[in-house]
Amino acid sequence: MSTTAAPPVHAPDHALVPPATPAQAACYQRLRGHLADLKLSAAATALPALLDAAREENLSVLEALERLLGLQASASAARRADNNLRFASLPAPWSLEDYGFLQAGLG
């Protein structure tokens, strides 16, 4: 199991390619519904661009699914980190640069 994050899926420069058949369109809508029901908003947002990228890059179903879920996992981890910082009730959003480590000769 890889621990590296999936590369971000960027919207292509061209318009998104619509599903080729009514059956594909219905499947796409069901997939969007499943993602919404599962509250996988990052995956639902990235799905159209990811499907186009999968078509253009000739990705296998497994590779496309891994990329989609990797994107969702990264978004969930970032949201969790933001929530942890917010709920920690720290007095301010401090960073390492806010401390005088380098000026004190510790760096």
Image (tube, grey):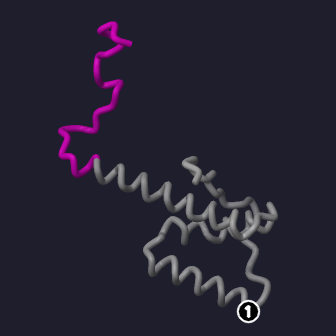
Tell me the residue at 51%/77% (across/down): 35
Relative to residue 79, is residue 88 drawn left or right?
Answer: left
Q: Which amino acid does label 1 sit on?
A: Pro
Q: Where is residue 95 in the image (x, y as percent from the top left)?
A: 33, 31
Nearest the viewer among 82 and 5 is: 5
Q: Where is residue 18 in the image (x, y as percent from the top left)?
A: 74, 79
Q: In this view, does 35 lie above or below 42?
A: below
Secondary structure of the residue carrying numbered label 1: helix
Asked if the stretch drawn in magenta spans residue 27, the answer is no
Q: Is residue 72 above or below residue 92?
A: below
Asked if the stretch drawn in magenta spans residue 97, the answer is yes
- What is the quadrant of the C terminus in the image? top left
Q: Position of residue 96 (x, y in %)?
A: 34, 27
- What is the quadrant of the N terminus in the image? bottom right
Nearest the viewer among 102 and 60 is: 60
Relative to residue 72, is residue 96 drawn left or right?
Answer: left
Q: Where is residue 79 in the image (x, y as percent from the top left)?
A: 39, 56
Q: Which residue lies furthest to the top in this view?
A: 105
Tell me the residue at 56%/58% (across/down): 70
Q: Callout 1: 10 Å neighbours few (<14), some, many (20+)?
A: few
Q: Which residue lies furthest to the front in this view?
A: 1
Name the image quarter holding residue 17: bottom right
Report the span colored magenta: 85-107
Which residue position holds label 1? 22
Q: In this view, does 77 lie above or below 31?
A: above
